[in-house]
Amino acid sequence: HGDFNQKIDYVFKIVLIGDSAVGKSQLLGRFSRNEFSLDSKATIGVEFQTKTVVIDHKNVKAQIWDTAGQERYRAVTSAYYRGAVGAMLVYDITKRQSFDHIARWLEELRGHADNNITIMLIGNKSDLDSQRDVSTDDAKEFAEREGLFFMETSALEATNVEPAFLTILTEIYRTVS
Ligand code: GDP
Ligand code: MG
């Protein structure tokens, strides 16, 4: 029942990138299965998860790729980026270093991905505001300068996770339709 014999109008590949432990796998678990785990092990093997949403009366299947522990610089292969129409660049708002590395991830992404890829900057773990190490303004300014969409999320509290994915999917839809 449900989305069983559903007609799919579009399939959009979105890649998750960013330093290890920023919450990429938990964001994906929250969006695709509404699940969260506090003691998530390093991601092993899982290539992608899918979730179908409705945008403009069309069934859009998001195929979201998660790094399989390849977060070291330049370890993500070009196969990972191939065919991606969207990318979420994730940092942890309590880890300055994960934000400082975003420029590097962006450079790597722009080197591998399609020119018109839609990119969204995500500051995750917004529930840990008392340990915040990256201001919202800093991130906003960076996103504006680089032409990225931006949102802060909490995979733990399910804050802004669906809106973030819907924003990037809607923007991708606009560029392809
Ligand atoms: P990844 O390496 O980027 O895939 O990071 P994970 O998704 O494995 O998450 C790393 C750790 O951060 C895990 O212990 C998660 O439970 C935790 N985590 C992920 N998202 C959040 C969040 O939104 N808030 C809090 N407080 N912890 C989170
Ligand atoms: Mg992971």
Image (cartoon, rainbow, N blue to C red):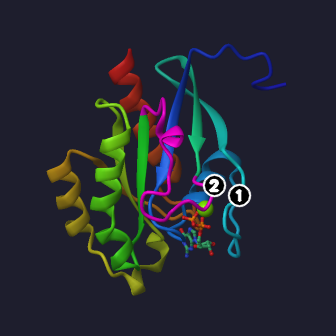
Q: Is residue 87 above or below residue 103?
A: above
Tell me the residue that label 1 is attached to.
35
Q: Secondary structure at mark 1?
A: loop
The main secondary structure of the magenta stretch is loop
Q: Is residue 92 left or right of residue 140?
A: right
Q: Amino acid at mark 2?
A: Arg
Q: Nearer the viewer, residue 123 or 13?
A: 13
Q: Which residues are magenta?
A: 67-85
Q: Nearer the viewer, residue 7 or 17?
A: 17
Q: Amino acid at mark 1?
A: Glu
Q: Residue at x 33, y 69 (%)?
A: 99
Q: Is residue 23 above or below residue 149?
A: below
User: Which quarter of the figure has residue 104?
Assistant: bottom left
Q: Secondary structure at mark 2?
A: helix
Residue at the extreme right of the image, as rendered: 1
Q: Is residue 79 above or below residue 137?
A: above
Q: Residue at x 72, y 53 (%)?
A: 45
> Contact, CB < 8 Å: mark 2 with mark 1?
yes
Q: Is residue 120 left or right of residue 83?
A: left
Quadrant holding ligand 2?
Answer: bottom right
